[in-house]
Image (cartoon, rainbow, N blue to C red):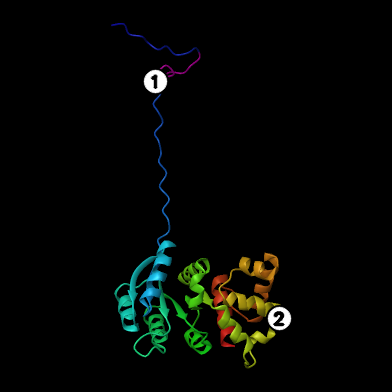
Amino acid sequence: MRVIRILPRAGCRKGCGEIAHRPREVTEPKRTDPPAVRVVLADDSVLLREGVARLLADAGFEIVAQAGDGEELLAAVAEDPPDVAIVDIRMPPTHTDEGLRAARRIRAEHPDVGVLVLSQYVETDYALELVSEGAAGLGYLLKDRVSNVQEFTDAVRRIDRGGSVIDPEVVSRLVGRARKASPIDSLSEREREVLALMAEGRSNQAISERMFLSPKTVEGHVRNIFTKLDLPATADDHRRVLAVLTFLRS
């Protein structure tokens, strides 16, 4: 058998004639999607409850439990606390404020669980009662809003992140009713408009599109709101919640 020797090229260092090893392939770690927001649903209407569950599941949420009344809801949250509990304000047995009372217990006993209350009607007193101890991780929406899938799912995600969402109809009623003197009085009319949109859970970009203002102008209004309401210099998200709470309490 004849052996063919591979000779190095002229001027080549030792080893040039050897067969080079293929470089080892380095596999990058696969990107993992963030975990799905875990949701518990409570509504005595099976049809509505199943519809909302399907809508949320299609949008990437995980439905961990469903309940038909306040007691079932509290038991489900205690057994496996979700990220967000979505609660109908009126549930059995009296169909008055069982959902509201359950929501307040969840906030007291499970402070890390966000709460979104759904209501058939605009009930400003219930909304104010709900936010009386803080608005972080809290939402109050009319059931009609569920039909706008993008806005509804955005609201649930915002609550999961610790933000707040108040239905525009509730905000409108609160703006229109008589109130005592408050820090809100120091805001200009345009700043109050911006704050009302913040209460609805809208971002600066969404506010600029809604009001036909540049993002920089909206940022200026938001800074003025924080300054005039004497809010501490913390993260913007936290200050937005504090500003909304001041607005609702006024």
User: Is residue 61 in the magenta section?
Assistant: no
Q: Which residue is drawn at the image coordinates 40% and 74% (left, top)?
A: 48
Q: What separation in Å lies between label 1 and label 2 (alpha carbons)?
A: 78 Å
Which quadrant is home to the N terminus?
Answer: top left
Give residue 104's position: percent from left, percent from top. Answer: 41, 84
In the image, is 137 to the left or to the right of 246?
A: left
SS under mark 2: helix
- Camera-nearest residue between 30 and 155: 155
Residue found 40% across the figure and 70% down from its top:
51
- N-term-proximal mark, 1 vs 2: 1
Disc 1 packing (10 Å; few <14; some 14–19; many ≥20): few
Q: Is residue 113 visible?
A: no
Q: Amino acid at mark 1?
A: Ile
* Residue at 63%, 81% in the rendered image: 229
Q: Which residues fall within the magenta stretch? A: 11-19
Residue 19: which numbered mark, if any? Answer: 1
* Dominant secondary structure (helix, strand or loop) of the stretch shown in magenta: loop
- Which residue reaches farthest top? 2
Looking at the image, is mark 1 or mark 2 nearer the viewer?
Answer: 2
Residue at left offset 45%, top offset 70%: 160
User: Which residue lies under the disc numbered 2?
Assistant: 189
How far across and how far down the image is residue 191, in percent?
68, 78
